[in-house]
Amino acid sequence: MSPLPQSLFWERKDTSGAEHALVDSSAGLYARGTALAVDPIPYTCRYELRTDDDWITGYLDVIAEGASWSRGVRLELAAGRWRATTREQGDLDAVLSSAGHAGAGLPGIEDPDRLFGAFDVDLGGSPLTNTLPVRRLGLHQAQGAEIGVAHRLSVAWVLLPSLEVVQADQIYTALPDGRIRYASETFSADLSIDDDGFVIDYPGLAARSDGKSG
């Protein structure tokens, strides 16, 4: 496994947790990362992500695990269509129930065709994946008439810790102050980014602590 040239580290604001990603963005994005959190139950998530040169996601492979359970999902985009492969050991539902939480959906997605037209993935709680549409649309370099234009996207949203995959509509807008507004049907946040489009500060979710902070 080859070393990667850049290290990004975020501390979670909404819960105890962190994300560490090693990335190479010289030709699209290749990233390997680890995310940890204690909510709704303690879990570790490891992922591998690759896009093409235009920052269209080609695959995402994720493993999430905690005490007495492990799940995995691999998403691959080829010829405009998504394929999902899953694996599971243990009983995540039982662990969630014993902690007083509702059960989780199954890993993956029953009908991958629901993701038709999605070119980005969004890993729950991960600031890294917000960079994908930012770079694909060139929002980190937006100028003039591009400022304030709302881009409505369909994304493959991977929920943690269940690794259930759902189609989600999201909106990204470059703001005059250099930030990026991310919005869904029920939520919005203005993200501070660096010159490469990586998130520095995601209000309410996470902040960089690798030498860049908002």
Image (spheres, rainbow, N blue to C red):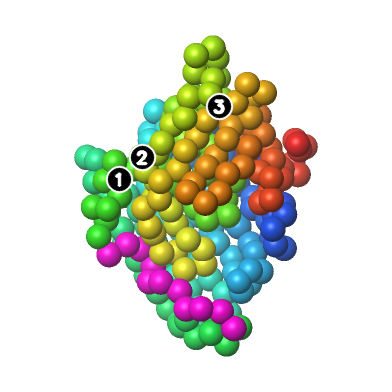
* Residue placed under numbered mark 1 in the picture: 77
Amino acid type assigned to the residue bearing label 1 in the image: Leu
Amino acid type assigned to the residue bearing label 2 in the image: Phe
Residue 102 covered by magenta stretch: yes
Upstream in sequence: badge 1 or badge 3: 1
Q: Nearer the viewer, residue 172 or 58?
A: 172
Q: Secondary structure at mark 1?
A: strand
* Residue placed under numbered mark 2 in the picture: 119
Residue 49 covered by magenta stretch: no
* Residue at 52% from the left image edge and 55% from the top image edge: 124
Q: Is residue 71 above or below residue 208?
A: below
Left or right: residue 88 compared with residue 194: left
- Distance, label 2 to label 3, CA atoms, is 19 Å
Q: Secondary structure at mark 2?
A: loop
Residues in magenta, as a range: 100-110
Proximity of marks 2 and 1: CB atoms separated by less than 8 Å? yes
Upstream in sequence: badge 2 or badge 3: 2
Q: Is residue 100 above or below residue 85?
A: below
Across and down, in percent, residue 88 comes to 40, 74
* Residue placed under numbered mark 3 in the picture: 174
**Foreground tag (1 vs 3):** 3
Q: Residue 182 falls in which quadrant of the image?
A: top right
Residue 206 appears in the rendering:
yes
**Foreground tag (2 vs 1):** 2
Q: Nearer the viewer, residue 28 or 132?
A: 132
Across and down, in percent, residue 129 comes to 52, 44
